[in-house]
Amino acid sequence: MDWQKLSHDIKEERRGIMAGIGINEAYNNFASTYVAKENANVDKHKKSDLQNVYKSIARINKESPLHVLKQDDNAQAEAVGIKEHARALRSQLQDIGSEEESALSKRSAVSSDSDKVSVEYVGSGQENSTEFTIAVDQLATNQINAGHFLPDEEVALPKGNYAFNANVNGHEYEFQYSIHEGDTNKDIQSKLTRLINKAGIGLVAGLQEDSQNQSTIIIGSNDTGLKTGYTLRFEISESSSSEKGLNVAYFGLNLVAQEPVNAHFYLNGNEHYSSSNRFTVGNQFDITLKQATEPGVPVSIGVKNENDALIENVRGLVNGYNGFIDSVSGVQNSDFKSSKLVGETVSIAQHHLQNTEPYGITINAEGRIDYDAQKLRDAANAGKTKEAIEPLKEFTKALVAKTEEISIDPMKYVERPVFNYKDPHGSDNPSPYITSEYSGMMFNNYC
């Protein structure tokens, strides 16, 4: 196979690729697989948070007996799943449990069309907030390169060592690899995608196949838009250290399928640009652009009144709690103590919400929370906002503490017989314990 025959006019190829393989859908799939997600604040730990995790595990080790964990993969998987549910609930509760007096009744922003422009209020609540409009002409896009479609047969390039350069936002990186006897095009394409993804330089790569079982490399930038003075987010070129050369042209690594552009929008009729689809307006509104707006139909952004904000925040608290109870109750495994965890969580709710019925918040027979938005609104209108919020704040704090306990040691809800008890007169050295071996290990991705 003569690889030179694969050379095409770049503009024509770009147009064909964009039409033929759903470039954005393919890239989004690769990004969700290879790029670390931007997690909620609960996942971003300070050094002191990691130290607290370690101290908590060491304390459990020292004070608890030694258990024997049954070799039940399903039960262990359920424990990991419950820990993740607890982390998700913790993420929902992190702001509501604040010490600030207005934590539950804090201001809440509203968008007239959240499908096109979503908003979150991030101000202190002391500012004078005014409504504004936003019209979106163009979303910020990332750069995507899409190479040549090659058959799954032996590489036509000579065997040997190769290299190429990637210039990302002005920083140069070199990638080196080798082609051996018997390597196919797909083998090398897979190798190149792994090299790029592991490099952590702001690029994500993956393979896309067509109906003829041919494959191509797709490379995209994590960042959208353009830096000042640049026309592309990244450029890929042949490296002078490559023994054989011409590998960039062979695979089409330098073919730009989608050029990066900045978001173009209007705030109250005034033109603005942004390299990102997410930005802050007036230190109060965290804006996320999702779609272009219809001509002449801008999206209105404003602040909800306090009562509406209270209703929305209580709804988030109730939905988070009920969702967690439903998740735990749905576990069907005889070696997993789901009823124990449900009972402990429901007891927290019953203790803190026993006097909230006048405000429309009650606990039903299944342990789920029911709330009447109108009763809560009436209480707020009658000047009883503080009376309604205080028990909810205390409930939230207790629930946060429970989620942290579950995250530290979810294995306590797995059937595990006691092997022996610690010698009460022994040393204070920590002993082997299941939370160190299993639960602590689970924190690798978060701390």
Image (tube, rainbow, N blue to C red):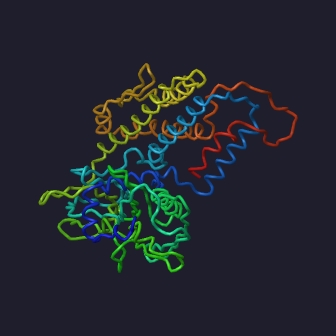
Nearest to the observer: residue 6 or residue 323: 6
**395 lies above or below 8:** above
Residue 148 percent coordinates (x, y):
36, 63
Nearest to the observer: residue 325 or residue 1: 1
Outermost residue toward the front in this view: 1
Q: Residue at x 57, y 29 (%)?
A: 74
**400 lies above or below 264:** above
Residue 170 percent coordinates (x, y):
44, 77
Q: Is residue 216 left or right of residue 304?
A: right
Residue 91 percent coordinates (x, y):
47, 45
Nearest to the observer: residue 249 or residue 29: 249
In the rendered image, the quadrant that contains the N terminus is bottom left
Count of labels in the image? 0
Q: Is residue 11 left or right of residue 63?
A: left
**245 lies above or below 434:** below
**143 lies above or below 207:** below
Q: Residue at x 58, y 40 (%)?
A: 407
The quarter holding residue 376 reads top left
Q: Is residue 339 left or right of residue 203?
A: right
Nearest to the observer: residue 249 or residue 30: 249
Q: Is residue 374 left or right of residue 253?
A: left
Residue 5 percent coordinates (x, y):
34, 69
